[in-house]
């Protein structure tokens, strides 16, 4: 892609301000945990893996501002900033996964020297970027065999480079297939209300020279009915132990439509998106967002200003509608309860080398 | 409603400019067939029944401008203006139904006096408004028994007063239930790309004091899954002899989702929307509209300016997904081929009195 969605400059978290795309490619630098929190909250940084990485960097920024001289005080400060950053978005589990990982660094460190602990946190955050790049590439390679030459993929929201550090999840599969000359076409759901498909995914695919067609979300059924969709692949924000998957609002409807048209429906996500603590999708907290996201677009009001609005940011797709989950450890198939646990076990083992 | 969506002033066709709603309630007056054609094309007037009435008035405006002195020349001019107006939108059959009806007035008239023929055309057009008001009220009464006290209805696009002369089709059922104190709640799909749900339906329902909640199109599956939708009712632009129904893009997906969630799905439409000439939905022409309707909202670009777009204005819902069609002759149930033909027969007989 050549776009570093989230990067560590050595002193700041630098990220693309995704609210400005596709009209302008603007980078912002966050110097404080509060700046990171706001970037997450207003979706300047979005996408489960990118959220996790940005939050980890927010912890580093917070740790650097700690005035604690004792190790105990420092650990307390790190926990406090982690809790604060965790309040930015409730649904994507990668946020909590990344924050827990950062807290564990200071809790389990061999040293009690505050400066060394701070450096350890920084190394961990940078390590997450490298891991994310490797994981995304492996997702691409794992999923590429699902795509035949000339296939048409439908995707929702943005699970591209902009949702991760650099390479994407659902789009990693498409990028890999494109690199192998498979001549892929992609239908891009615009993804109301915040239009991540229209603004981000269409932009990424065009930059990569991949043939894309933008549709409104309500056109997906029609293109499926016309026999023009071979496979649906989306990202995920949290996957429960039984395979139920929270992702951008609209994903569940798409999965229902895919089932009705016998189009295979896949999720692509790193195993850090799997939350084995949660038995099923019913327990995943769903973020409710500002009604004005629906009532207006930019500064233009598109509905009566006082109309009541329901604006859940995510929905939950039950495991029975998911043909497979494309992860860095391969494609996980049903039964998910057993197979996800196995894959997470492998992945934790594989990642062991990077922790302090 | 108190809003005359389309009206005849005696010299001009006066209509609400629906592109300005909900921010401003603006009326425009069309003095020429070209002005009517453009009002139809840019969706200042939209909704199958309203389109038919506006086009009929366009014929009157054209007939008045005819310089023909002979009856033959006049009939030729009327046919020409009817053909021209018929080119504004291809899908809604009410347009062609209304235009044929106007042409028949001059073809079958007892007089050959051009001034009297012009007056006959004017009377026919005004008659269509009165008929439409009566038909819409009868649709409301026919459908009201489908709604129980406290029911939650989901609707798509605008099948309200703004889609007809005054009372609406799908919304006529809701207005009638509201008038009977049934305490109805309505989920309103915003209906991308032109947002008729957000702009028009939400506005109409709020004016009528009916509890409405606006959602993005891609949220419908979620609210159904939550058990919050008791029935789906939409309008129609053309109903084939077998019951297959063309309506605003997104309707087909909604019908699939309703089936998956065991929510009854109904169409509400006047019998002038039924096209017995067409055997099935496969033969209904689907209007493809400007890609910029998807690429931008108002003046704001929400996607890369050169991204390819698929923008069908309508889709076709197969009859098997439709529980019933609410018409002025009652609720038509399957088998549609037989029952629609019977209902159309009755309705033609009922309307006989109004023709020349």
Image (tube, coloured by chain):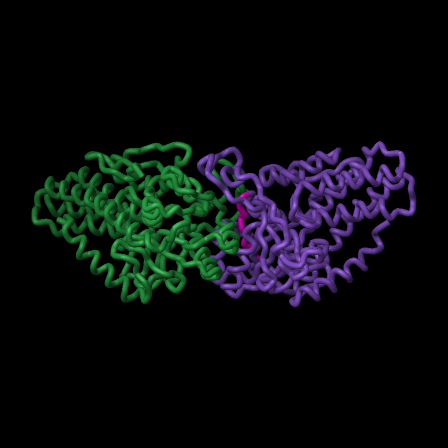
Chain colours: A purple, B green
Q: Please tell me which residue lies in front, B160 or A221.
A: B160
**Residues shaded magenta:** A185-193
Q: Please tell me which residue lies in front, A272 or B104.
A: A272
Which quarter of the image is occupied by the N terminus of chain B?
top left
In the displayed structure, A137 sits above or below A287; it is below
Quadrant of the rendered image containing residue A353: bottom right
Quadrant of the rendered image containing residue B327: bottom left
Asked if residue B35 lies left or right of residue B354, the reply is: right
Residue B295 location, x and y as percent? Answer: 50, 43
The residue positioned 75% from the left and 48% from the top of the image is: A98
Asked if residue B59 lies left or right of residue A146, the reply is: left
Q: Please tell me which residue lies in front, A142 or A334.
A: A334
The image shows a total of numbered marks equal to 0
In the displayed structure, A84 sits above or below B287; it is above
Residue B277 location, x and y as percent? Answer: 27, 61
Q: Is residue B277 visible?
A: yes
Residue A10 location, x and y as percent? Answer: 81, 38
Q: Residue B83 lies in magenta, yes or no? A: no
Q: Is residue A166 visible?
A: no
């Amino acid at each position: 892609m050549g776009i570093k969605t989230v990067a560590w400059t050595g002193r700041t978290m630098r990220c693309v301000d995704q609210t400005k795309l596709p009209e302008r490619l603007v980078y912002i630098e966050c110097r404080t945990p509060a700046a990171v929190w706001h970037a997450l909250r207003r979706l300047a940084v979005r996408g489960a893996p990118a959220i996790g990485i940005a939050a980890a960097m927010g912890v580093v920024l917070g740790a650097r501002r700690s005035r604690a001289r004792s190790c105990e005080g420092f650990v307390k400060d790190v926990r406090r900033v982690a809790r604060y950053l965790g309040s930015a978005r409730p649904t994507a589990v990668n946020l909590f996964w990344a924050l827990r990982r950062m807290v564990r660094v200071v809790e389990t460190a061999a040293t009690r020297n505050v400066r060394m602990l701070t450096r350890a946190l920084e190394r961990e955050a940078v390590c997450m970027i490298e891991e994310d790049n490797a994981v995304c590439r492996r997702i691409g390679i794992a999923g590429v065999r699902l795509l035949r030459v000339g296939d048409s993929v439908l995707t929702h929201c943005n699970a591209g480079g902009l949702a991760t550090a650099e390479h994407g999840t659902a789009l990693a599969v498409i990028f890999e297939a494109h690199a192998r000359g498979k001549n892929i076409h992609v239908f891009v759901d615009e993804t109301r209300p915040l239009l991540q498909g229209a603004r981000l995914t269409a932009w990424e695919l065009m930059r990569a020279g991949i043939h894309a067609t933008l549709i409104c979300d309500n056109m997906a059924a029609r293109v499926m009915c016309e026999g023009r969709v071979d496979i649906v692949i989306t990202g995920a924000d949290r996957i429960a132990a039984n395979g139920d998957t929270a992702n951008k609002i609209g994903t569940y409807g798409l999965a229902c439509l895919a089932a009705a048209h016998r189009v295979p429906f896949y999720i692509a996500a790193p195993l850090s998106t799997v939350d084995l603590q949660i038995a099923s999708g019913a327990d995943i907290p769903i973020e409710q967002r500002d009604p004005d996201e629906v009532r207006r677009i930019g500064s233009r009001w598109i509905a009566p200003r006082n109309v009541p609005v329901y604006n859940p940011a995510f929905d939950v797709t039950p495991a029975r509608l998911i043909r497979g989950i494309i992860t860095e450890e391969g494609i996980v198939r049903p039964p998910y309860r057993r197979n996800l646990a196995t894959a997470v076990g492998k992945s934790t083992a594989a990642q062991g080398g990077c922790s302090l």
